[in-house]
Image (cartoon, rainbow, N blue to C red):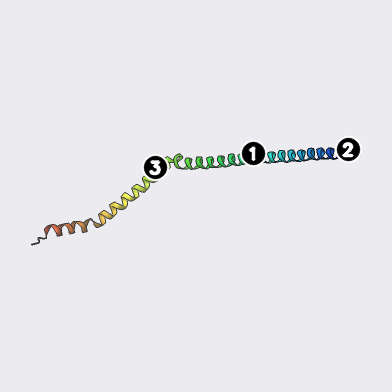
Amino acid sequence: MEANRGQNGIQLLLAAEQEAQHIVNTARNAKMARLKQAKEEADKEIAEFRAHMEAEYQRKLAESSGDSGANVKRLERETEAKIGHLKTEASRISHDVVQMLLKHVTTVKN
């Protein structure tokens, strides 16, 4: 009877060990599945972010270089406006500058 009880105890221990091993394996597999899912989600987010940034870059590139003709025309208009402003200012003060120069040239100092 004592041997029978010992045998049952050993059988119970073996069954408990197998159950524990099964629980550990199940948890390990679940953890690996979660890690794999997290990696896939991260890869997906990275791909989406990369695509978004590439699209933004291409849009800005198209804005800056695609309209180079428009940029040239805008710069030409700005340059012409500045030249016109400078000519207007020069003609406005040229009489005063000439008078000042004549005064300095014709004034004799001892």
Q: x, y (%) of residue 10?
A: 83, 38
The kind of secondary structure element at disc 3 is helix
Q: How far apart are marks 1 and 2 (CA)?
A: 55 Å
Residue in the foreground of this view, choosing between 32 and 9: 9
Q: x, y (%) of residue 85?
A: 31, 53
Q: Which label is found at residue 72?
A: 3
Q: How many marks?
A: 3
Q: Which label is found at residue 85?
A: none
Q: Is residue 72 left or right of residue 47?
A: left
Mark 3 neighbour class, 10 Å CA radius: few under 14, some 14 to 19, many 20 or more: few
Q: Quadrant of the N terminus?
A: top right
Q: Which label is found at residue 40?
A: 1
Residue in the foreground of this view, choosing between 98 and 3: 3
The kind of secondary structure element at disc 2 is helix
Q: What residue type is labelled 1?
A: Glu
Whether 85 is drawn above or below 109: the answer is above
Sequence order check, earlier mark of 3 and 2: 2
Q: In this view, does 39 lie to the left or right of 108?
A: right
Tell me the mark number nearer the camera, choosing from 3 and 2: 2
Tell me the mark number nearer the camera, choosing from 1 and 2: 2
Q: Name the residue under label 2.
A: 3
Q: Distance between the residues labelled 3 and 2?
A: 102 Å
Residue in the foreground of this view, choosing between 29 and 60: 29
